[in-house]
Image (cartoon, rainbow, N blue to C red):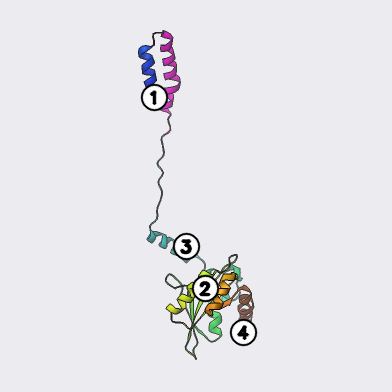
């Protein structure tokens, strides 16, 4: 814009031909003035940034908003309809019925351990990781963190239970670390049949 005004000033001073004056007038009234009047203002973009505490609080509120099923509903709900926490509860109920004493850990700082099972007779503890996944297989990173969590929680054994499956590297890592794996087929077979028997016992 400065270049345009400089050029106009130069022509205005040195141009002797009156036709240039009309050219300047037309240029000013038809192009430059409307451009200045209707020049859009630059919008300042404001980016809303959430700090770590706000983000954690937001995620926590979303987690609390999820529907939590009752124990009776857990026995009849489809596995695919459960959220992560309800799946942990169902697994805990299953092992409690098998004679273990389950404690749900969960939350931040769980060291990849969702449930700790205690054998009431032998008094040894088992670290359990639950993965309620549909289209994603559990990788070896989860197995390695579970093995670390087993030591943190002073457990002798570690089990991983998922509704999906495991990658090849996860199976290899679990075999080397002596971690027991339960995939979706095991869940449908073991826990699925247990739920049917549990419902029949309740009805009787």
In the rendered image, residue 113, in percent from the top left (x then y), is placed at 48, 75
Q: CA distance from mark 2 to mark 1?
A: 67 Å
Q: What range is drawn magenta here? A: 15-42
Quadrant of res 171: bottom right
- In primary-sequence order, the first of circles 3 and 4 is 3
Would you name the residue on which mark 3 appears?
62
Closest to the camera, between mark 2 and mark 3, is 2
The image quadrant that residue 110 belongs to is bottom left
Category of crowding for the residue at label 2, using alpha-carbon neighbours closer than 10 angstroms: few (below 14), some (14–19), many (at least 20): many
Nearest the viewer among 137 and 134 is: 137
Q: Secondary structure at mark 2?
A: helix
Kindly check if marks 2 and 3 are in contact, taking CB atoms under 8 A apart as contact.
no
Q: CA distance from mark 1 to mark 4?
A: 90 Å
The location of residue 54, given as percent across then percent down, is 39, 59
Give 153 or 134, whichever is nearer the viewer.
Answer: 153
Q: Which circle marks residue 201 in the picture?
A: 4
Specify the quadrant that holds the N terminus. Answer: top left
Q: Residue at 44% across / 71% down in the picture?
A: 107
**Secondary structure beneath label 1:** helix
Q: Secondary structure at mark 4?
A: helix
Main SS class of the magenta portion in the image: helix
N-terminal label among 1 and 4: 1
Q: Which residue is mark 1?
A: 3
Q: Nearer the viewer, mark 1 or mark 3?
A: 1
Between label 1 and label 4, give the one nearer the viewer: 1
User: Mark 3 or mark 2, which is nearer the start of the sequence?
Assistant: 3
Please indicate, yes or no, whether residue 166 appears anywhere in the rendered image. no
Q: Determine which of the numbered discs, if any, sits on residue 143 in the image.
A: 2
Of 103 and 1, nearer the camera is 1
């Amino acid at each position: 814009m400065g270049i345009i005004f400089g050029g106009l000033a130069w022509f205005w001073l040195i141009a002797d031909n009156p036709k240039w004056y009309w050219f300047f007038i037309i240029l000013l009234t038809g192009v430059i003035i409307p451009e200045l009047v209707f020049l859009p203002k630059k919008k300042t973009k404001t980016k809303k940034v959430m700090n770590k505490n706000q983000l954690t609080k937001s995620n926590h509120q979303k987690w609390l908003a999820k529907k939590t099923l009752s124990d009776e509903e857990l026995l009849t709900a489809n596995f695919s309809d459960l959220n992560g926490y309800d799946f942990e509860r169902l697994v805990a109920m299953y092992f409690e019925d098998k004679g273990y004493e389950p404690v749900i850990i969960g939350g931040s700082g769980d060291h990849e351990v969702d449930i700790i099972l205690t054998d009431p007779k032998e008094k040894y503890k088992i670290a359990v990781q639950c993965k309620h996944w549909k289209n994603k297989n559990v990788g070896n990173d989860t197995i390695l963190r579970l093995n670390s969590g087993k030591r943190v929680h002073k457990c002798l054994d570690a089990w991983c239970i998922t509704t999906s499956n495991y990658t090849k590297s996860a199976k290899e890592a679990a075999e080397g670390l002596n971690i027991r794996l339960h995939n979706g087929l095991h869940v449908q077979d073991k826990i699925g049949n247990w739920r049917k028997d549990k419902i029949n016992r309740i009805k009787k």
